[in-house]
Image (tube, grey):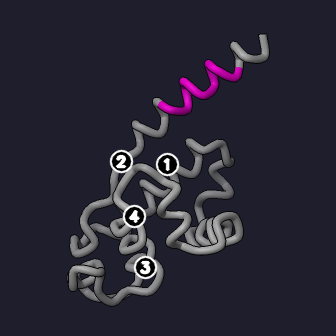
Amino acid sequence: MIRKILGVSIFISSFAAFACPNALPVDDVNFCPSFKKAAVCHCTASGLPESLCQDMHILYERMIIMFKSLERACEFQHYTSKQDCIDNWRCYLVGGEDSLGRACSSTKLPCE
């Protein structure tokens, strides 16, 4: 019975993860809200309450505590390439340019 419940839970959560949007490209003017929406969706799909997923700085800190580095966290996820994941987080939190030289959010400014 426990296996059946666990199997159904995993099955349902896998659909929830696929329902999450991808962020727009980092140089898009709407990158910031699109990245936050995608990150919150994946966070809640992983089982955390939405209240713990709203603050992107806290979410980032939780990732670093869990995986020890952004690179390892981005290797673990399977929604985008590792480099796209790294670029997205760095653009969101720090700004500047991504690994391809594109201006973060078209302004080079961090999102928050």
Disc with the residue nearer the chain's start (1 vs 2): 2
12 above or below 30? Answer: above
Q: What SS does tag 2 mark?
A: loop
Question: In the drawing, what numbered circle is on residue 82?
Answer: 4
Query: Pointer 1 and pointer 3: residues touching (CB < 8 Å)?
Result: no
Residue at which label 1 appears: 41
Nearer mark to the viewer, of 3 and 4? 4
**Image-quadrant location for residue 9:** top right
Question: Is 85 placed left or right of 50 in the picture?
Answer: left
Count residues near mark 2 (Cα–Cα under 10 Å), then give few for <14, some for 14-19, many for 20+. some
Q: Give the position of the N terminus as an image quadrant.
A: top right
Gap between marks 1 and 4 measured at Cα: 18 Å
Q: Nearer the viewer, mark 2 or mark 3?
A: 3
* Up-down relation of residue 96 to residue 76 (above or below): below
Q: Residue furthest right?
A: 2
Instruction: Look at the numbered disc 1 and give the secondary structure of its residue.
Output: helix
The residue shown at (59%, 61%) is 54
Q: Decide whether residue 7 is among the magenta residues.
A: yes
Q: Which mark is residue 21?
A: 2
In the image, what residue occupies the spot 59% across and 46% down? Answer: 44
In the drawing, does residue 49 fall left or right of residue 14?
Answer: right
Does residue 67 appear in this view? yes
* Residue 56: percent from left, percent from top: 56, 69
- Which residue does the image show at 48% across and 61% down from the upper left? 75
- Residue 104 in the image, given as x and y percentages of width and height: 29, 81
| Disc 2 residue type (three-letter) | Pro
Q: Residue 14, relative to residue 78: is it above or below? A: above
The residue where tag 3 is placed is: 90
Left or right side of 81 for 39: right
